Amino acid sequence: MNKQTDAFIHHAADRAESETASIGTSLPHESAALHVSGEATYTDDIPELQGTLHAALGLSRHAHARIASLDLSAVRSAPGVIAVLSATDIPGENNCGPVLHDDPILADDEVLYLGQPVFAVIAESHELARRAAALAKSDDVVRYDPLDVVLTPAEAKAKKQFVLPPLHLTRGEPAAKIAAAPHQIQGSFDVGGQEQFYLEGQVAYAVPKEMDSMLVYSSTQHPSEMQQVVAHMLDWPAHSVVCECRRMGGGFGGKESQSALFACVAALAAKLLQRPVKLRADRDDDFMITGKRHDAVYEYEAGFDDTGRILGARVEIALRAGYSADLSGAVATRAVCHFDNAYYLSDVDIVALCCKTNTQSNTAFRGFGGPQGALVMEVMLDSIARQLKLDPLDVRLANYYGVGERDVTPYGQRVEDNVIAPLTDELLASSDYRARRAALAVYNATSPVLKRGIAFSPVKFGISFNVPFLNQAGALVHVYKDGSILVNHGGTEMGQGLNTKVAQVVANELGVPLSRVRATATDTSKVANTSATAASTGSDLNGKAAEAAARTIRERLAALAARELGGEPDAVQFKDSMVHANGVTMPFPQLVNMAYLARVQLWSDGFYATPKVHWDAKTLTGHPFYYFAYGAAVSEVVVDTLTGEWKLVRADVLHDAGQSINPAIDIGQVEGGFIQGMGWLTTEELWWNRDGRLMTHAPSTYKIPAVSDTPAAFHVQLYRNENAEPTVFRSKAVGEPPLLLPFSVFLAIRDAIAATAPQANHAPPLRAPATPEAILDALEAMQQAASVVSMPAAGSSDPKEPETAATSVGNTTAGAAPKTPASVDTAT
């Protein structure tokens, strides 16, 4: 933990009302000790009941093909195999799609991506099931008639092949404003997808119960949806299925809808065989089966004035949806609503396409389309600044939303809680941005090989589900006779500290220390019809629901105390495990026991529905977000122009979490989100071959950031700011917004590459992720452009000239497969 973080945490502790304050204090994660000791029980750790069987999936070998024949006799006769199931064994609906019914549990007649489950093997052990499932590779088991394959968004766009109709939002007269502007820019840009890479993979354990019912333990962010899809598949009513999840080892969106396939297969086998069945996907299978963050191809143009202020803008965002709709519609909508990021756009045209491809069905991922929408804006502003030869920071400042003016988003929502300007001022001062940028220019002028770059990027992120009915939550609170408290709510714990925060809220409401409150496993038989734990709404929704339940109990206790001790109920105080009424003080457990004897109800439910949220999906206008979270980051990198290697040497982050419920947890979320977003934009490259096979399907071929990628100077602070809306403790969501902060890392790499050709008036054609290969491609392109502009004398060998590094880069990449730069800016 760095000094700044430590100082802020102590400051937050000092602000607490007392030493036993349960909210606004940096308290440990409720399962921290269990995590580090290995005692935490995840779904795969649940003790297996006698007779438990294990499932594995037989996967398609083609990206698109008809199933010509399916002969499972060899699989059935494999050692240890108890049963082999196919689509014909499903008694109800063969679908696990969360929105449209276009996502089969097991392929029937046709496969739509390489890795799609075709059959399920149920065997006596995990290993035996895997070995039998591997027979899917044989033509004797499954024979295919291959069909045409579409793999990329560009191919799907050309064929007008989409999983959903295009989204189109227009405000003002963007075409006219672009044409009339003093300057114009147009270009294209690519950003790759991202594997969720949760520590705990997809897993489900189904246990048949009496009277045709089922208990499904699922590593899922959405137990209610798992309950529904399992019930539909089995043709049962929902009350016959209970789904439970104590904790996940990470989710990031990958377990919102895509845990359904695994829950369904385990439950199907358990129902047909009347034995417990566990399905735990190996990491390779997990990669091959499940969807990722949507990658995107952008085409954009803008008109702007001499300060870089945008007068009109247009963008087309082509997302790779994969073979089915999944959550692509909501992802595309959020991308549309975050194209503006922190900037006012008076005249704008935004199109989002959900391109249908024969690849895994892409799904939710931290930020849920917001990062894809905002990234292209930051790239475009950086390009505008380089065309005008201005500091990109100043161009950003010129385009910021105002307060009381220039404050309406393209979709019609006013930005009423805007703190981006003072937050920016604070970060620029603490990071010493201006002086460091000047120092880097001096450094780069005398360093032919190593180039440094620095960049600033802000974020304005809307908080709420953009489907209004999902913004609701329920909770139960029980107070036992000894004064201990149990809370159950509809949110799921995936390491983000949700249970800790909800328990803090309940403890604060009843005036007891956190140690007196326990949060239990999420369970559809306790709180029904819940929303997914996603869109950063977990604490907002479930915290408010739990607060409502605890407040009801407190009011009952206060009425009893006033009746027994005198005074008014409103004057009764609950603090430090004591109850204060009419000058009399008694321990909280004493009042609770008194209430039990007086037959006062000591449990309550609570419900919360987010106010103000509404959305017209046809016009793409409304008030889709309850409030906005803000943040900004300054990142400095060094790039080796000979190898394309780079390193983040310093990052300064200031993030708005409102009045934090738990500063330690929130700072951890900011740090984790920053590093995860940095991985998306720099190291995590997904690659499919022309057959549609995902080649980056394991830790050996897919690189997430490591501990060594964290900068030695990592300055993370929370911006002191109360939420303008009455959320719990006036806090703000902090799960997704920080993932956008490392845009500054990608832009800093662009800045370092630009330093190799300072005479150029356009941005480096750097694609994302900015792998060493991508960096070398951009360096080579910059040097080729610079040589046309400067035409240096032949034979020049001055080692201080940037061309020296570029020549080496050209030699380094000689013989490599040629690549067309995926980001091209054409200035006019």
Image (tube, rainbow, N blue to C red):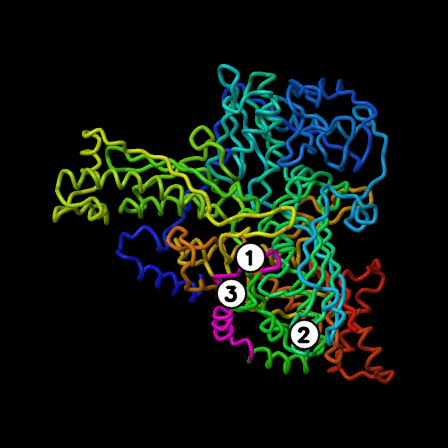
Eye-nearest disc, 1 or 3: 1
Image marks 1 and 3: residues in contact by CB distance under 8 Å: no
Q: How crowded is mark 1: few (under 14 residues within 10 Å), some or many (20 or more)?
A: some
The residue nearer to you, when weighing 539 against 69, is 539
Q: Residue 653: which numbered mark, if any?
A: 3
The residue depicted at 22 percent of the width and 36 percent of the height is 592
Residue under pointer 1: 413
At label 2, the amino acid type is Ala
Residue 591's quadrant in the figure? top left
Q: Which portion, as a residue range, is magenta?
A: 409-434
Residue 742 appears in the rendering: yes
Looking at the rendered structure, the kind of residue marked 1 is Gln
Spatial CA distance of label 1 from label 2 is: 28 Å
The first of marks 2 and 3 along the sequence is 2
Quarter placement of the N terminus = bottom left
Q: Which of marks 2 and 3 is in front?
A: 2
Percent of width and height locating residue 809: 78, 69
Depth-wise, is mark 1 or mark 2 nearer the camera? 1
Is 421 in the magenta? yes
Q: Where is residue 271 in the image (x, y as percent from the top left)?
A: 58, 19
Quadrant of residue 181 within the rendered picture: bottom right
Q: Work out which quarter of the rendered image holds the C terminus and state it.
A: bottom right
Mark closer to the chain start, 1 or 3: 1
Depth check: give the residue in front, 520 or 339. 339
Q: What element does badge 3 sit on?
A: strand
What separation in Å lies between label 1 and label 3 (alpha carbons)?
Answer: 27 Å
- Image x and y of residue 751, in percent: 67, 72
Residue for badge 2: 385
Q: Distance between the residues labelled 2 and 3?
A: 22 Å
Q: For the residue carrying disc 3, how many other residues have a C-alpha within 10 Å: few (<14), some (14-19), or many (20+)? A: many
